[in-house]
Image: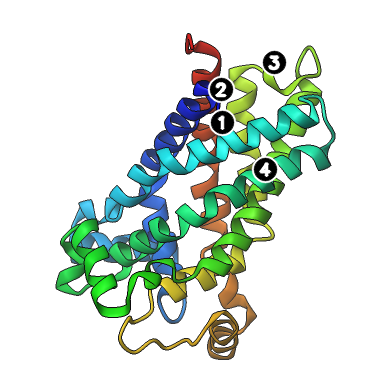
Amino acid sequence: MNARDLLSGACGGGLAVLISQPIDVVRVQLQTMPGSSSAVATARTLVQQRGILSLWRGTTPPLLGAGLLMSVFRTTQQSTSRVFGEDGSFVKFAAAGAIGGLAQAPLAVPVEHLKVRLQVCQAQWCSCGIVPLARHIVSVAGVGALWRGWAPTVMRDVIGFGLFFGCTDYVLARTSPTGRRGDASFVASFAAGCGLGWTFWVASFPLDVIKARLQGDSLLKPAYTGVLDCLRQTVRAGGVGTLFNGFALTAIGFATPKNGAKLLGFDLVSRCLPV
């Protein structure tokens, strides 16, 4: 286990969360609310009803979890990349990203579940913090309920991380002076993260919508019996386009700063840390 990979993953993940959280709150609202609305209108409503700090609601779970999740991801992804070679093909870089995404997914599910609950739930117990919230979920629906939405989360992360790191690492390797991903400049890493952040979502976004709806569903009287039932009801109620509610906001407004910060954090710590 490489200390650089662990620490760079933690720093990159934490920085990405802090920068992108307000946009994440708005996009989750767009995904889970009935009907359709614009990002600006949704943000305005949130601020009017709950105050400006509501845009950072649900920050604690991903901020605390991002360090652990991205440490697991980064360690797995980098170890796999070293086996394949830093001057590898797109397929090798994508495989390393997908394997890293799979490794962190079991931990990501409860973190994302708690985050979604905090962001969309208006009940009193939802505003008491992550520990009381987790305790409430367990008392009402059992420990397994913390992993509600695990299937779309795993599929989203395997596909998303595979495409994103396949694209970014391939581009950075091909444009670096030595042809190696590890020798790309900080500016290039930040630019690649910003410019290619949308690749995470281009094929995985409908899975994220289904995940958010399952995780924001009632614990006592859930409207959905599972992934397929959620998909069926969502399409029946609002059409196929409902599966892409908030896509532009997520793929551009959310993914651009988040992934730029993530790659920059990865590379800064990896190269500057004397360990």
Query: In x, y percent, where is residue 5?
Result: 54, 27
Q: Which residue is mark 2?
A: 267
Nearer to us in this view, 97 or 55 = 97
Colour basis:
rainbow
Residue 53 falls left or right of residue 233: left
Mark 3 closeness class: few <14, some 14–19, many ≥20 residues within 10 Å = some
Q: Which residue, given by chain and number where applicable, does mark 3 sit on? A: 183
Question: Which element carries disc 3, helix, strand or loop?
Answer: helix
Q: What kind of element bears circle 1?
A: helix
Label 3 vs 1, first from the N-terminus: 3
How packed is label 1: few (under 14 Cα within 10 Å), some, or many (20 or more)? many
Q: What's the CA distance linking mark 2 and mark 1? A: 6 Å
Which mark, residue 263? 1
Mark 2 and mark 1 in contact? Answer it, CB < 8 Å: yes
Q: Earlier in the sequence, mark 2 or mark 4?
A: 4
Measured Cα–Cα span from mark 3 to mark 4: 18 Å
Nearest the viewer among 108 and 31 is 108
Residue 249 on image: x %, y %: 51, 56
